[in-house]
Image (cartoon, coloured by chain):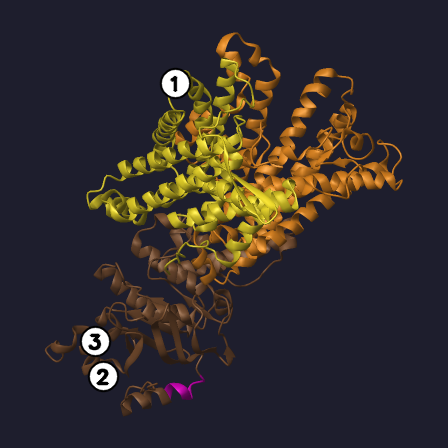
Amino acid sequence: MRGEREEVKGMKKGLYLWAGLLGLVLILQLIPVNNLLFAKKIVPLVWQCCYLIIAATSLNLVVGCLGQLSLGHCGFMAIGAYTSALLSLWAQRAGVFSHKESVAYIVVVLISIVAGGLLAGLVGLAVGIPALRLKGDYLAIITLGFGMIVVNLINNLPFAGMDGLSLGSAASGLYKTGLGFSNRLLVKYLWIALLGTTGAMTLMFKFMKSRFGRNVRAIRDDEIGAAACGINVPAYKVGTFALSACLGGVAGGIYACFMSALTTGSFAFTNNGILNSTFLVAMCVLGGLGSLSGSAIAAAIMCLLNYLISQTGLNSLPGWIGLAFSYPMLIYAVVLVVIIIFMPGGLTGGREISLKAVIGKFGARLK
Amino acid sequence: MAKLIQTLATGLQLGSVYALVALGYTMVYGIIKLINFAHGDLIMVGGYTLLYTIPMIASMGLSPWIAVVFAVVVCVMIGVLTELLAYRPVRRRGTGMTALITAMAMSLILQNLAQYLLYMTHTMYGATVKSIFPQGSISITLGHQKLSLSLATLCTIGISCGIMIALQFMVRRTALGRAMRAVSEDKEASSLMGIGVNRIILVTFVIGSALAGIASAMWFSIYPSTSPGIGSALGLFAFVSAVLGGIGSIPGAVVGGFVIGIVYSFTTSYISSGMSDAVVFLMLIMVLLFMPAGLLGKEMKEKV
Amino acid sequence: MKKMSVPETTVLYRRYIEQMAAGGSPVLRTEGLGITFGGLKAVQDFNIEVYPGELLGIIGPNGAGKTTVFNLLTGVYRPSEGAIYIGDRLMNGSPPHRFVEMGIARTFQNIRLFSSMTVLENVMVAIRDHSYSLVSALLGLPQCARGEGELRRRAMELLEIFDLGDKWDTVAGSLPYGRQRMLEIARALATGMKVLLLDEPAAGMNPVETQELLSYIGRISREFRVAILLIEHDMSLVMNVCRRIQVINFGETIALGLPEEIACNKQVIRAYLGGDLAGGE
């Protein structure tokens, strides 16, 4: 039977994936932490890539796969980040762990990230139920508003106050005690980021390949047609939105581990970085709407480019070229428009990339 | 009582600026179904134009009002450029989603270009624009309290009301307005009727940008400080006004603008200035949930 | 208010209904169904009884309210008066997917396929058998792959019936128009319904395709034992396929009868040709 053969193949593939990840983690443990290039340059880049990939891919679940425009994804990231940061702080205060190399600490970190994701998912559910009754640009503006409200509320949170959150910023004080890794820990716990990314991506791929994902795509193609096939359209919309929010929250938790301090400005609609709701949507479009692998690649490319421009001294080039590179946003935006004009379908045209197809294509070209 | 009226006046003043900017959003949205995120940044463009032209014109001994002409011209040029260079090519090839991203990117480009130019010209952040309105205020005595309304406030409200009435007349009664309405209903049918669709879209951008130029003069008479990002927050509020009033509807944008202005000014003076964003957006969400087409918009149902 | 008079029916027609009723109670039934759009009564006092396995046509001139009736019968619109029963269950106000669960499936006048998905996926979406759970899908448990295989097999079976088997991997949107209509019918069948509502299935088809469609409709009715409710304004198609016909105009039922009766019904001819020309056919 064809089904069973595929089943065995699929399970094998999954097994390889996890074995590879485990191997990678083990190898990582072998690299000395004082290897400067690795610890100072590569590891932070990998962390950034990881949370951007999760954030962009989970947004693509809603924007690309479900076809509903959301401009407030960073709001969910903010919820995840602040929840996990505060939770870890609480755990530290309660004496759950004493130092950051203990097993208890790892457990606390993992629980914090998951809890951040769950809370973001719950908020996604609560926001999605009313908001998803609207469509298109109305939904876009509502989610945009949601993102702003989240930032606004966190900025005005009374309970956090001096306990680490003051006016929306989790001070570096919080990071001495709670979440937030030093350079050393970033290397040691790199596996958390990798695990989170692999886990989240696997989850999304499995979801989209199942009948549930098929129903989601059906809704994107034709809502009324989908309802006529017996799909509970509102439930699917809200469910997908909540799943996306939840994974966005996980991305936020990983972000909180990576950063040495949190500010709500990082989760705005636009800012001077590449982590904001605008750029997340841009990554989805660049990668190809509806292609999870595409948005992951787009996120990684953006992350790398940003790193290259900001870290390699391009901005110290002489004359206006160097000056232009000191305003990378300008370059990104121009490139974005050019790509959209010449490649409206993004990198992948909305299809998933499979390794087999890529190899096949290259093989054909070589011949 | 005096505080109440004062707050109301500030709200109306803010509201008339929002309304003028919202008109630009609503007209462009009505015609090409695009949230033109770059529209808010035209306020910033206008602001910087005023920053340079007002002293220049004053030194020539002319009325500062003439500076507004420059602001309008520059805003129109930028607005038209965004349409020609970005929106039109994307409209031909992309989808609604790519067009929206393009609009966000155009907003980023304008903001960062401004930053770049500021650096090149050694302009300070937060340089202040002189008001084009005459100084002075009208004092009214209400019982024991004295209330003063500045001429800028009164001029702003008066001028924008005039513009809005003229615009409404233009859209309802002239051939151009009829063509605009036709294009917004059905582009294909309009082009079959001999309407140059792209030309009408361009005209819409021209009108919207011109309104933004005028609005910038009003805005900077309230908050004179300039910065490259000034337009995005204002633009967002103006867009919210347009959605609140019913996007695509000109009276809707006006009503929405005044409502947002008043709510904003009351939240700031009676609750907390930090919460005004949240309150405004919460109000928007509430309105949309109960009146999905906004206050004055008409609901479109998908035909099955 | 004037009460709507039920159109007169012939003895032959009543005998036919009695015969159908003997086979079982109606699967789909409405009582005084009506809907108002902004003061306009689009459909009023619409009564219908659909018996298992029967072929029933609804005809009427353009704008008579046929599609509105379908939208009411499938839960797309919420009726402003009257009642819809599937079996004994009152369905007023239920969402469209509940109607599908209860056994009503439909096609659309303007085809509503999932145009970016493959032919096979289009049919798989509609199979209502909840073969595996979300958890097993997310964890990649064996029962998920098994369930997928089963869905795939059943979808292929349906595609074979409509000669779409070899096209299973094609993107639905790139099929020729006539094939798309067939696929939409296949997709509707996949829901495992008791009543199939076809909204102008022959619209835009050439005569050869229409003939093909006729034979498919006959085959579905025989092999699947489902009731088929057909909207058409192509009279000849309806006359050929349907066993009885209900005619509506301006949202009201103006005639009920067997095809041959309808063909010479004065009211119907007047509705189609306009008042003064009646009888001049």
| Residue lying furthest left | C280
Label 1 amino acid? Answer: Gly
Amino acid of disc 2: Glu
Whether residue B180 appears in this view of the structure is: yes
At 62% across and 48% down in the image, what residue appears?
A243
User: Which one is nearer the viewer's eye here, C169 or A327?
Assistant: A327
Same chain? Circles 2 and 1: no
Q: Which chain is orange?
A: A
Residue at the image point whose x is 49% and y is 29% from the top: B108
Between circles 2 and 3, the one closer to the viewer is 3
In this picture, residue B276 sits left or right of residue C226: right
Q: Which residue is mark 1?
A: B61
Chain at numbered mark 3 = C
Question: What chain is the yellow one?
Answer: B
Please state the horizontal and vertical placement of residue A172, each as a whole percent of the image.
77, 29
Q: Is residue A261 left or right of residue C97?
A: right
Magenta stretch bounds: C19-25
Q: Chain of mark 1?
A: B
Numbered tag placed on residue C261 in the rendering: 2
Q: Decide: marks 2, 1 in contact (CB < 8 A)?
A: no
The shade of chain C is brown
Residue C182 vertical placement versus B237 (above, below): below
Q: Do the numbered discs 1 and 3 sit on residues whose CB atoms are within 8 Å?
A: no
In space, the residues marked 1 and 3 are separated at their CA atoms by 79 Å
Give the CA distance from mark 2 to mark 1.
Answer: 92 Å
Is residue A142 located in the magenta-colored stretch of the structure? no
Three-letter code, disc 3:
Ala
Q: Which residue is mark 3?
A: C271
